Image: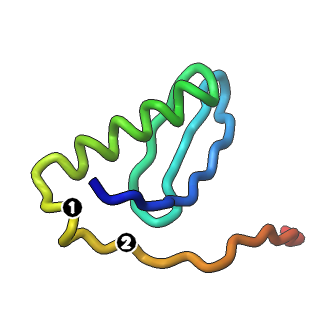
């Protein structure tokens, strides 16, 4: 099995934590940060279940930055 590093962002919405891969339109949630990440990994397994992983391409993210904006 091939190893791939995916960038993950986690934030809190109300009482739940939301986890999302930056490279994919794939997100999940949980009652804790750890549960949200675990559920996100399970969602990825389901997403890739019928795919030949060697044929799946992920966008390459070279840098992640934070920006402060005035709204």
Secondary structure at numbered mark 2:
loop
Q: Which residue in the protein does label 2 denote?
A: 58
Decide: is 9 above or below 39.
below
Estimate the x, y position of residue 29 in percent, counting from the top left: 50, 32
Way the structure is coloured: rainbow
Estimate the x, y position of residue 63 in percent, counting from the top left: 67, 77
Res 24 → quadrant: bottom left
Question: Is 59 displayed left or right of 67 in the figure?
Answer: left
Secondary structure at numbered mark 1:
helix
Estimate the x, y position of residue 70 in percent, counting from the top left: 89, 70
Decide: is 42 above or below 5.
above
Decide: is 37 above or below 44.
above
Determine the residue positioned at 49% across, 55% down: 21
Q: Return the disc, 2 or 1, that comes first in the chain's sequence.
A: 1
Distance of label 2 from label 1 (alpha carbons): 11 Å
Determine the residue positioned at 41% across, 40% down: 41
Question: Is 19 displayed left or right of 50 in the figure?
Answer: right
Residue 4: mark in rendering: none
**Between tags 2 and 1, which lies in front?**
1
Q: Which of 15 and 63 is in front in this view?
A: 63
Res 71 → quadrant: bottom right
């Amino acid at each position: 099995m091939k190893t791939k590093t995916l960038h993950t962002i986690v934030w809190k919405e109300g009482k739940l934590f939301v986890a999302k891969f930056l490279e994919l339109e794939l997100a999940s949630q949980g009652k804790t940060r750890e549960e949200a990440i675990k559920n996100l990994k399970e969602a990825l397994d389901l997403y890739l279940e019928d795919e030949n992983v060697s044929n799946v391409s992920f966008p390459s993210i070279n840098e992640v930055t934070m920006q402060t904006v005035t709204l």
